[in-house]
């Protein structure tokens, strides 16, 4: 049973003028294309195809707003890095994300989805920088933890924790075998009730 039985898609935005009114609270989810962002959202919200998954990385190209509960939203941000798109589109995404982080007073937290096998890359660091510039709490989901043996996953977790220091919290996560789902849900709830 979903903690968010009434969750629904509201709208997509391709420009800051299309963002929803800045009230209530919202938690953003960001991640490189192919890091498993849509799968993570679906498992955390416990709704199949809530966020569309695709075999082609980079399908999330707009800022997608979802209503979780009255006055509480989840915002799926465009993922890039692996997506095969023109440089002008990447530039547009960068400006759109910058505007989003700078403008949203209702934004209370960021879930950053990172493929454990690649660890933190430039895009992830850019997201951390956006969040840091507005003192936004960040929780990192090291996805696809099921793809590594336990020892290697634990080592990767320690390395990322060391790099992040106090700038973010981090956990192991797997949409495939549901590892870390309860912890991720607790963090989402905490961000939503901040």
Image (tube, rainbow, N blue to C red):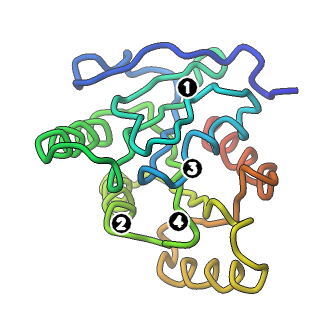
Sequence order check: which comes first, mark 1 or mark 4?
Answer: 1
Sequence order check: which comes first, mark 4 or mark 2?
Answer: 2
Whether pointer 1 and pointer 2 mark residues with C-beta atoms closer than 8 Å, the reply is no
> In the figure, 92 relative to 117: above or below?
above
In this view, the mark in front (1 or 2):
2
Q: Name the residue under label 3.
A: 36
Which dot marks residue 171? none
From mark 1 to mark 2, how far is it between C-alphas? 24 Å
Residue found farthest to the right: 1
Q: Where is residue 38 in the image (x, y as percent from the top left)?
A: 57, 39
Q: In which quarter of the image is residue 96?
A: top left
Left or right relative to 64: residue 181 = right
Q: Is mark 4 on a helix, strand or loop?
A: loop
Which dot marks residue 125? 2
Q: Is the residue marked by circle 1 packed among few (<14), some (14-19), or many (20+) residues within 10 Å? A: many
From mark 3 to mark 4, how far is it between C-alphas? 19 Å
Q: Quadrant of residue 32?
A: bottom left
> In the figure, 142 relative to 34: above or below?
below
Left or right relative to 5: residue 109 = left
In this view, the mark in front (3 or 4):
3
Which dot marks residue 73? 1
In this view, the mark in front (4 or 2):
2
Whether pointer 1 and pointer 3 mark residues with C-beta atoms closer than 8 Å, the reply is no
Q: Is the residue marked by circle 4 packed among few (<14), some (14-19), or many (20+) residues within 10 Å? A: many
Which dot marks residue 168? 4
In this view, the mark in front (3 or 2):
3
């Amino acid at each position: 049973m979903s903690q968010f039985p009434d969750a629904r898609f509201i709208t997509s935005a391709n420009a800051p003028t299309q963002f929803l009114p800045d009230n209530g609270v919202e938690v953003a989810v960001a991640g490189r294309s192919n890091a498993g962002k849509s799968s993570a959202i679906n498992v955390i919200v416990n709704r199949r195809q809530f966020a569309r998954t695709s075999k082609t990385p980079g399908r999330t190209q707009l800022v997608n707003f979802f209503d979780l509960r009255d006055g509480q939203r989840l915002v799926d941000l465009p993922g890039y890095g692996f997506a095969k798109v023109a440089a002008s589109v990447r530039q547009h995404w960068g400006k759109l994300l910058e505007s989003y982080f700078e403008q949203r007073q209702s934004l209370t937290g960021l879930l950053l989805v990172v493929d454990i096998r690649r660890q933190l890359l430039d895009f992830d660091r850019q997201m951390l920088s956006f969040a840091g510039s507005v003192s936004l709490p960040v929780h990192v989901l090291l996805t696809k933890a099921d793809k590594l043996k336990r020892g290697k996953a634990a080592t990767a977790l320690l390395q990322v924790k060391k790099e992040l220091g106090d700038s973010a919290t981090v956990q192991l996560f797997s949409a495939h075998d549901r590892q870390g789902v309860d912890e991720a849900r607790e963090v989402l709830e905490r961000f939503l009730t901040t």
